[in-house]
Image (tube, rainbow, N blue to C red):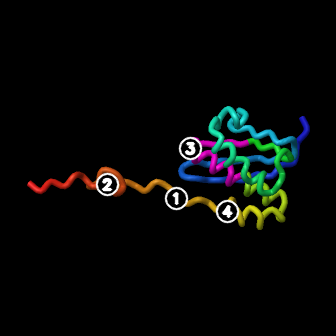
Amino acid sequence: MVEQAYVWGTGKRKCAIAQVKLFSGDGKITVNGKPYQEVFTRLLYRQLIEAPYQVTETMGKYDAIVKTKGGGLSGQAAAIRHSIARALVKQNELFKPLLRQEGLLTRDARIKERKKYGLKRARKAPQYTKR
């Protein structure tokens, strides 16, 4: 087996974490051992994942092997987008302004707020009774 040179990137969104290895290739994206079209059936999620390639005009030039865990499909798709964008910057520093302008390098810090005592959820209070 021949060792291929690759760059890696880690992306996060909500509770999801994605680690990607980026190889030069013909554009195959594998998520947890399956093609990404099988894992992400909604078109919106596929477009999220392809966004860094679209911005840098490198669609079909890099293969990505992605390991993802935690969260749901939406969080995982955004985490993959973040990790691919970071890996592309490691591959070529000239992509950084393009990806930064589109907001693909910024970690979306919105996570679920913790539940507080005396409340039903983070902010929902029990129903007020007058008598």
Task: Give 37 or 66, whichever is nearer the viewer.
Answer: 37
Residue type of the residue flagged with mark 4:
Gly
Residue at the limit of the structure toward the left, as seen here: 131
User: Which badge, 2 or 3, comes first in the chain's sequence?
Assistant: 3
Q: Would you name the residue on which mark 2 appears?
A: 124
Task: Give 102 or 94, whichever is nearer the viewer.
Answer: 102
**Split into 4 quadrants, where in the image is the C terminus?**
bottom left
Q: Is residue 55 above or below residue 69?
A: below
The percent coordinates of residue 24 (x first, y second) are 87, 46
Disc assigned to residue 70? 3
Image mark count: 4
Q: Disc 2 and disc 3: Cα gap in Å?
A: 25 Å
Q: Are marks 4 and 1 in contact (CB under 8 Å)?
A: no
Main secondary structure of the magenta stretch: helix
Q: Is residue 62 above or below residue 41?
A: below
117 relative position to 32: left or right: left
Q: Which residues are magenta?
A: 66-83
User: Which badge, 4 or 3, comes first in the chain's sequence?
Assistant: 3
Residue type of the residue flagged with mark 2:
Lys
Q: Are marks 1 and 3 in contact (CB under 8 Å)?
A: no
Residue drawn at 73 percent across, 34 percent down: 35
Q: Are marks 1 and 2 in contact (CB under 8 Å)?
A: no
User: Which badge, 1 or 2, comes first in the chain's sequence?
Assistant: 1
Residue type of the residue flagged with mark 1:
Arg
Q: Would you name the residue on which mark 1 appears?
A: 110
Q: Disc 4 and disc 3: Cα gap in Å?
A: 23 Å
Say which quarter of the image contains residue 57. bottom right
Disc assigned to residue 103? 4
The percent coordinates of residue 17 (x first, y second) are 61, 49
